[in-house]
Image: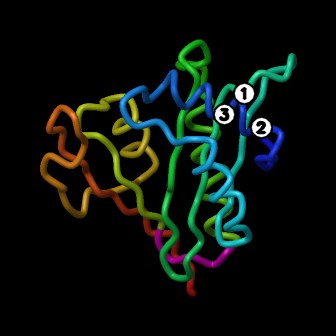
Amino acid sequence: MRDLRWTDIEALSALELELFPQDAWSAATWWSELAGRPRRSYVVHESSSGDLLAYGGLDLGGEVADVMTMAVAPAAQGQGLGRQLLDELVARAQADHAAYLMLEVRADNAAARKLYDSKGFEVVSIRRRYYQPGDVDAQVMRLSLGGEA
């Protein structure tokens, strides 16, 4: 894992479009997120050949940190990269002294929900029909980190 660099944006935008064709973040959005440092913290995992395999990021806003995005390339899914990525995001939130880490997940994303459940995240609310198109609910989840802002 390493910090996201501006040179990653083209590959990241392409991977984002592959993963989320309906609502992919644009290159402009990624530029904006990088400009938000140090409050925004993004990490990528790349293969030995330099291909981006996973990425994720946080908004470090004090007592509560938020997972902004997290994804693993289709060819790399099922290899534990999601767990490694989440561990890194949790560690970054803890290092920033956040007391809680929040995220939202599609209610129909069983693999992600299973990962978050295994890490101790709890559902705190439901956003009905949040993801469009498709009218899919979002589960808002929280992990207590035991830190102080």
Residue type at numbered disc 1: Leu
Q: Residue furthest bottom?
A: 149
Snapshot quadrant of residue 96: bottom right
Residue ID for mark 2 = 8
Helix, strand or loop: magenta stretch: loop
Residue 40 in the image, given as x and y percentages of width and height: 65, 64
Establish if 20 lies above or below 139: above
Residue type at numbered disc 3: Leu
- Give the secondary structure at mark 3: helix
Q: Residues within 10 Å of mark 3 (few under 14, many from 20)?
A: many
- Badges 3 and 2: C-beta atoms under 8 Å apart? yes
- Badges 1 and 2: C-beta atoms under 8 Å apart? yes
- Badges 1 and 3: C-beta atoms under 8 Å apart? yes
Q: Which mark is residue 52?
A: 1
Snapshot quadrant of residue 39: bottom right
Question: Does 98 appear in magenta?
Answer: yes
- Give the secondary structure at mark 1: strand
Quarter occupied by the C terminus: bottom right
Q: Residue at x 53, y 17 (%)?
A: 74
Range covered by the magenta-colored residues: 96-100
Q: Is residue 136 left or right of residue 79?
A: left
Q: Is residue 133 left or right of residue 42?
A: left
Q: Residue at x 72, y 67 (%)?
A: 37
Residue ID for mark 3 = 12
Q: Give whichever of discs 1 and 3 has the lower sequence position.
A: 3
